[in-house]
Image (spheres, helix red, strand yellow):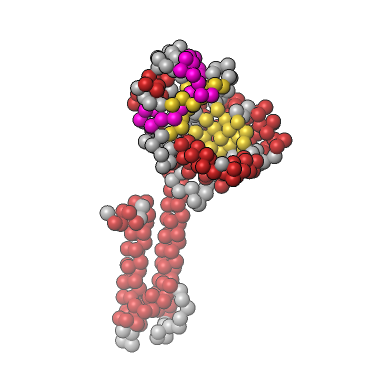
Amino acid sequence: MRNELLLPATMRRPLGVASALLVLLLAAGTILFRLVGGEGWTWFDAFYMTVISVTTVGYGEVHPLGPAGRIVAIGVILWGIGIAVYVSGSLAEVLVEGRLLKRRRVLRRARRMRDHYIICGYGRVGRAICHELRSQGAPYVVIALEESEDAGDEPLIVGDATDDDVLRQAGIERARGLITVLGSDAENIYTVLAARSLRPDLFIVARCSEDRSAAKLTKAGANRVINPYERSGLVMARVLLRPRVVDFLEEVARGAGLEVVLEEVTVTEGSPLAGVSLRDSPIRRDLDIIVTAIFRPDGEKVFNPRPEEVIQPGSVLIVIGRPASLDRLLVLAGGAEEGDAGRSDA
């Protein structure tokens, strides 16, 4: 069991063969040097001569070699070089196969995903996004131009995010959302265009570095455009002015350190909540969930809605409650199947 943990199965076979060949070479070289060396050679002299020939360290001969001895030395050296070439080639093959197997495994995993998120770009911002989605238990796939050494087990697809085929490999037809955080605004614009052409209803978030690119990204089809430099300045100012408020909202949004979570719930057509007032719904009465705001289908936002507020189909409820209660609310709203409503942050 310990050997299986230390070495992959694909590496154990070539290393085992190389070890057997090396032992055979040392034994054969020792015997041949002893035989051609004559009475002046001891078994240790023959073994020592074999070792320095295999390793090609360049030390002098233990005893003067005749033609037969030099032929043996040439054979030992060539045999040793052959083993070294075999081992290096086998290791290179294992590395290449490992990368190919990982890529195929990621592609198979992406084909099985549904309602996942696609992250285009694996820089500092992309890594932070992956960390947050992973902490929330949200499924995601990463698209990057090249493999990263610190990617680890990240579901990373190597390719160009502006390529339609690469987006299809990432399962864009079944994705819930896409975020592009590539190195330049031009790349993000092309990615948004490609994604929007494949999925007109997909929710797309894009990063921009310059203010003039925000309008272009919006026209290209991005639902949200975020300038991280501007946004970080706003967050820092809010922390300076209202640190407790910012800390509370972040903890509630992430579900960290508190028993309640801030969530958005979409009420679908045919939901038992549709057409029912907040007072008559089980949201507060049975689930003990607080509705802080309602985004109506016409775009109107109602903050701190009254108990008489009627929930319309297509409305988005911004709610605060315990994870288990939110799971039940998702089922009632039609946003999740009964078996898929479990929350990882519970």
Residue at the left extreme?
Answer: 1
- Residue at coordinates 32% horizontally, 63% vertically from top-left? 20
- In the rendered view, tell whether residue 275 sits above or below residue 138: above
The answer to whether residue 25 is seen in the rendering is yes
- Residue at coordinates 57% horizontally, 30% vertically from top-left? 204
Instruction: Report the front residue among 114 and 145.
Output: 114
Q: Is residue 311 magenta?
A: yes
| Residue 339 image point, x, y percent | 34, 26
| Residue 94 image point, x, y percent | 42, 52
Q: Is residue 92 left or right of residue 167?
A: left
Q: Quadrant of residue 284?
A: top left
Picture quarter with the C terminus:
top left
Q: Is residue 133 left or right of residue 18?
A: right
| Residue 65 image point, x, y percent | 41, 82
- Residue at coordinates 68% horizontally, 33% vertically from top-left? 214
- In the rendered view, tell whether residue 154 sits above or below residue 21: above
Q: Quadrant of residue 137?
A: top left
Q: Quadrant of residue 67?
A: bottom left
Instruction: Report the front residue among 300 and 86.
Output: 300
| Residue 68 image point, x, y percent | 40, 78
Instruction: Report the front residue among 235 and 272.
Output: 235
The magenta segment is 303-328
